Amino acid sequence: MNAADRLSHFLAGVERKAFRQAVYAVRDEQGALDIVQDAMMKLAEKYPDAPENELPLLFQRILQNTIRDYYRRQKVRNFWVSPMSFFASGQEGQEDHDPMEHVQATDVNSDPFYVLATDKSLASIQKAIEKLPGRQREAFLLRYWEEMDVAETATVMGCSEGSVKTHCSRAVHALATMLKNKGSSYE
């Protein structure tokens, strides 16, 4: 199998997981599709001849960077566009311009208390994961987010399977403690 076929096969196999990961990260299906496509294109453009065993780690790094770029763009866009829309003038000749027309409506079918609780829970989990030491975070995300087995995780991390188990165990205990202290019970 040539390099292009290996890369194509890899991307076909990782597509669904990457989409789920992006949707969880940005909570927007269209944004997630764009992120996954961008990450796949970057991998194909920058690493077309990468060895097959390096593709998962390369792709994960590219995907995470693409998600961060998405958030940066959204932050800048929201900083400038949303406040400015209140000051936008109406169409020519309209004197009764209502600035509230420019505010995005929320989904009327969603329960605001549920959305708030879910957002707070996700934010707490994300902050707790960010506080983990680097190797624990990496092992945790590869094992439980990427659903890799212990051997695959050890290969990607360049360590023994025992080290992966230790990092994951410590990460789970640390997350449980952090989340319990915040009043969440995810045990």
Image (cartoon, helix red, strand yellow):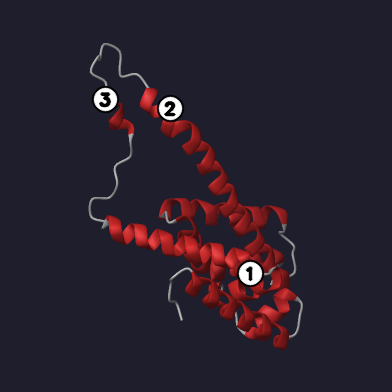
Find numbered disc 2 in the image and state the secondary structure of the residue it sits on: helix
Residue at the spot x=65%, y=65% of the render?
A: 7
User: Residue tagged by mark 1?
Assistant: 132
**Number of the front mark, 1 or 3:** 1
Q: Check disc 1: other Cα within 10 Å, few if <14, some if 14-19, many if 20+.
A: some
Q: Amino acid at mark 1?
A: Leu
Residue at the spot x=74%, y=62% of the render?
A: 49
Image spot of residue 3 (x, y percent)? 71, 66
Q: Check disc 2: other Cα within 10 Å, few if <14, some if 14-19, many if 20+.
A: few
Of mark 1 and mark 3, the one earlier in the sequence is 3
Image spot of residue 133 (x, y percent)? 68, 69
Foreground residue among 48 and 179: 179
Q: Amino acid at mark 2?
A: Met
| Marks 1,3: beta carbons within 8 A | no
Find numbered disc 1 in the image and state the secondary structure of the residue it sits on: loop
Of mark 3 and mark 2, the one earlier in the sequence is 2
Does 155 appear above or below 99?
below
| Marks 3,2: beta carbons within 8 A | no
User: Residue tagged by mark 2?
Assistant: 84
Cα–Cα gap, marks 2 and 1 = 38 Å
The quadrant holding residue 157 is: bottom right
Q: Residue furthest top?
A: 93
Cα–Cα gap, marks 1 and 3 = 47 Å
**In this rendering, position of residue 160 left or right of residue 70:** right
Of mark 2 and mark 1, the one earlier in the sequence is 2
* Number of marks: 3
Does 82 appear above or below 68?
above
Q: Work out whether residue 8 can be spotted.
A: no
Cα–Cα gap, marks 3 and 2 = 13 Å
**In this rendering, position of residue 63 left or right of residue 28:** right
Residue at the spot x=63%, y=54% of the render?
A: 65
Using the image, tell me which numbered label, if any, was put on residue 98: 3
